[in-house]
Image: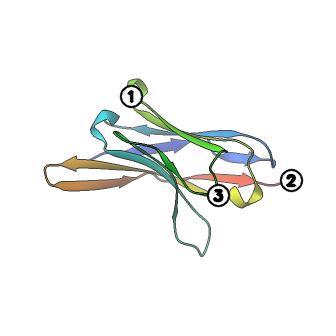
């Protein structure tokens, strides 16, 4: 079992920056993918950014050039640096991790952290 704890959400004004953190209860080197998703009321959860252990990072078109995902193996933490925030970035942000065990991949989610962008 892997526990993920997000932090760093809050209320900011348009154009501001925030950094979200996702602390894992295991060595994140064991996690194939760490990713950030977001969800607003009445809508499906959508991928914001993904950071595979091997391979290229990928981003939703709506955040390319503004958001950066990173992984710090020493701290067992993934981050989402969000710059030039817009009101449409307002959502609950969730951290997701995938861990392969044999031929099975287990998926874990954090509890979410609220980001509100408003003037």
Depth-wise, is mark 1 or mark 3 nearer the camera?
A: 3
Element at badge 2? loop
The tally of labels here is: 3
Q: Residue at x 66, y 52 (%)?
A: 115
Q: CA distance from mark 2 to mark 3?
A: 20 Å
Element at badge 1? helix
Depth-wise, is mark 1 or mark 2 nearer the camera?
A: 1
Q: CA distance from mark 1 to mark 2?
A: 36 Å
**Of the pair 17 and 68, the residue shown nearer to us:** 68
Relative side of 99 to 115, left or right: left
Q: Is residue 64 above or below residue 75?
A: below
The percent position of residue 14, horizontal first and vertical second, equals 81, 49
Q: Residue furthest left?
A: 102
Relative side of 16 to 31, left or right: right
Relative side of 75 to 8, left or right: left
**Which mark is drawn over residue 114?**
none
Q: Residue at x 37, y 42 (%)?
A: 55
Element at badge 3? loop
The percent position of residue 77, horizontal first and vertical second, equals 44, 34
Q: How is the image coloured?
A: rainbow
Q: Residue at x 24, y 55 (%)?
A: 105
What residue is disc 2 on? Answer: 119
Tag 1–tag 2 contact (CB < 8 Å): no
What residue is disc 3 on? Answer: 62
Local packing at callout 3 (Cα closer than 10 Å; few below 14, some 14-19, many 20+) is few
**Which mark is drawn over residue 73?**
1
Q: CA distance from mark 1 to mark 3?
A: 27 Å
């Amino acid at each position: 079992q892997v526990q993920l704890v997000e932090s760093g959400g809050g209320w900011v004004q348009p154009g501001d920056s925030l950094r979200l953190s996702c602390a894992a209860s295991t060595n994140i080197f064991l996690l194939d993918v760490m990713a950030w998703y977001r969800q607003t009321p009445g809508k499906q959860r959508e991928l914001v950014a993904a950071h595979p252990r091997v391979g290229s990072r990928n981003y939703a078109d709506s955040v390319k050039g503004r958001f950066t995902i990173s992984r710090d193996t020493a701290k067992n933490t993934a981050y989402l640096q969000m710059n030039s925030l817009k009101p449409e970035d307002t959502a609950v942000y969730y951290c997701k991790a995938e861990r392969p065990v044999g031929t099975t991949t287990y998926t874990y989610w954090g509890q979410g952290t609220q980001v509100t962008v408003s003037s």
